[in-house]
Image (cartoon, rainbow, N blue to C red):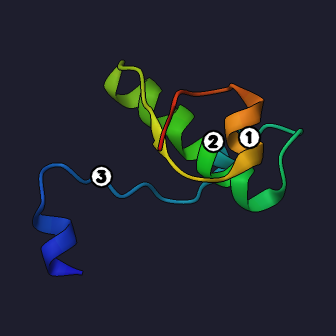
Amino acid sequence: MQTIAADPRITIFPLDVFVVAGMPGNLDIHDALIVATAFAAQKLFAEEIAILTRAELITASRLLPVVW
């Protein structure tokens, strides 16, 4: 965990009410939490965030850019 926390390319987001409130309703809970966390990162960094995933539902939702 120390290695992850020390890496400037990584930001750890808490699962809090703001992330939960941003969960899209058209995804299962796990995919919705991933997307909602990306939404929170977009707000924090004021940048477009892409998700690295093979999850077909996230890709099909077109809510965020997907890299794979």
Q: To which residue does mark 1 refer?
A: 21
Circle nearer the N terminus (2, 3): 3
Asked whether 54 or 47 is in front, the reply is 54
Say whether marks 2 and 1 touch (CB < 8 Å).
yes
Kindly identify the residue that appears in the image at 63 percent across and 42 percent down. 36
Q: CA distance from mark 1 to mark 3?
A: 20 Å
Q: Residues within 10 Å of mark 3 (few under 14, many from 20)?
A: few
Q: CA distance from mark 2 to mark 1?
A: 8 Å
Q: Position of residue 32 (x, y in %)?
A: 73, 48
Q: Residues within 10 Å of mark 2 (few under 14, many from 20)?
A: many
Three-letter amino acid code of the residue under disc 1: Ala
Find numbered disc 2 in the image and state the secondary structure of the residue it sits on: helix
Q: Position of residue 43 (x, y in %)?
A: 45, 25
Three-letter amino acid code of the residue under disc 3: Thr
Q: Quadrant of residue 45?
A: top left
Q: To which residue does mark 3 refer?
A: 11
Q: Is residue 55 above or below residue 46?
A: below
Kindly identify the residue that appears in the image at 12 percent across and 60 percent down. 7
Asked whether 23 or 14 is in front, the reply is 23
Q: To which residue does mark 2 refer?
A: 36
